Image: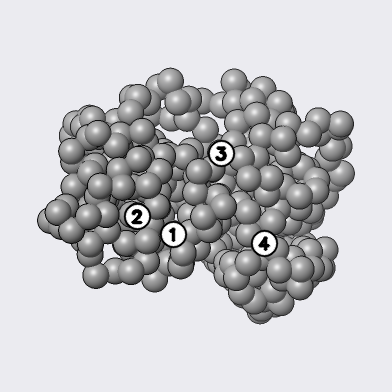
Amino acid sequence: MESATSYGEELMRLVREAGADRVGVTTAEPLTRAREAIELRIASGMADGMQFTFRNPERSTTPTMSVPGAKSIIVAARSYYIDARSVGGDSVETAASTVPATVPAQVARYAWRNHYEPLREALRVAAKRLKRDGHRATVFADDNSVVDREVAYRAGLGWYGKNANLLLEGLGSWFVLGCVVTTAELSPTHREVADGCGACRRCLDACPTGAIVAPGVVDARKCLAWLIQKPGVFDPAFRDALGTRIYGCDDCQEVCPPTRRGATALSIADGTTRNVVDALEILTAPESKVLEICDEWYVADRNPRWVRRNALIILGNSNLGENEEVALALARYIHGNDDLLSEHARWAANKLGRTDLLSAEYVP
């Protein structure tokens, strides 16, 4: 009979061969440390209404609530690093053509393409094998059911950086994570990965809003990656800092020495990649087209209103006040029937020195 150790090693090998960069195994015991951290963030207000694994801390930190009888978790990491130099400049790259963007809006690297599906496919290879052998097995990736960073940490894949990302030993943080929760009993790969941050604090200093309030502690109320997704009024205190970001923020990873060094060891992915979209198109296209543009993004209630809100701020930060298309787009929203978008458009017009757009003469 195959031992738990050899069986686990065989499953990890299958996942690696299917496309994962690193694989480990841990038990399905409750993630008590992660639950304490989540509950502390919620109590302090720093979760700022985020849902995801914060929605139900007990569930997201108790694997057996997702898979009754679970004993083990196979966790995998897959690189999403793509060298920006291999992607066109200020353009929207599609499968068919590259279209210049009038107002370039930057997309965070993890959202340049769907990186989770290839990871799910790799994990499904192990899940199929487990099911064939009579075990229950469920794949979770980009899912609120499991705090996968803590699972990966416990399996010995890496350490927590000061930016709260999991850094893989020798590779850094350009990775998506996922796992297979199973009733099979597998030998864990537990080991302590040394902290590779040392005295470095570049991520704290580079954060454009000071959201990393202590090593490993991110205040979502200041984090652009969350504020971009959060519905409602975009805090005026952070509109300048948003710059040209339409989705996500990579600053704390871009400056991280272990992540920068690790990137050189990762392969540059090929295929269709989109690192920039056109903020002006988001403001002028039909809602269905806007949702198509941001198809892979998290958008609250799938409401394009929030993406357009962000696009209006980007227009205000664009220095393109003399561009007639920009002016007309702002005027359309200033005098439109959505008070929230009108307020953001007014802010943008004032930022660009185009107070004339507030006049009824510019009603489209």
Task: Please state the horizontal and vertical placement of residue 131, each as a whole percent of the image.
Answer: 55, 66
Of mark 4 and mark 1, the one earlier in the sequence is 4
Q: Which amino acid lies under the numbered mark 1 shown in the image of this protein?
A: Tyr
Between 92 and 21, the one lying in front of the other is 92
Q: Which amino acid lies under the numbered mark 4 shown in the image of this protein?
A: Val
The Cα atoms of the two marked residues, 2 and 1, are separated by: 26 Å
Neighbor class of circle 4 (other Cα within 10 Å; few <14, some 14-19, many 20+) is many
Discs 4/2, front: 2
The Cα atoms of the two marked residues, 2 and 3, are separated by: 28 Å
On residue 147, the disc is: 4
- In the shown orientation, is residue 58 left or right of residue 335? right
Q: Which residue is mark 3?
A: 250
Q: Which amino acid lies under the numbered mark 3 shown in the image of this protein?
A: Asp
Marks 3 and 4 in Cβ contact (< 8 Å): no
Neighbor class of circle 1 (other Cα within 10 Å; few <14, some 14-19, many 20+) is few
Between 161 and 334, the one lying in front of the other is 334
Of mark 3 and mark 4, the one earlier in the sequence is 4
- For the N terminus, give its image quadrant: bottom right
On screen, residue 122 above or below 334: above
Task: Please state the horizontal and vertical placement of residue 180, each as a whole percent of the image.
Answer: 60, 60
* The image quarter in which residue 86 lies: top left
Q: Which residue is mark 2?
A: 346
> Which residue corresponds to the image point at 76% horizontal and 50% vertical from the top-left?
213
Element on which disc 2 rests: helix
> Which residue corresponds to the image point at 81% horizontal and 30% vertical from the top-left?
200
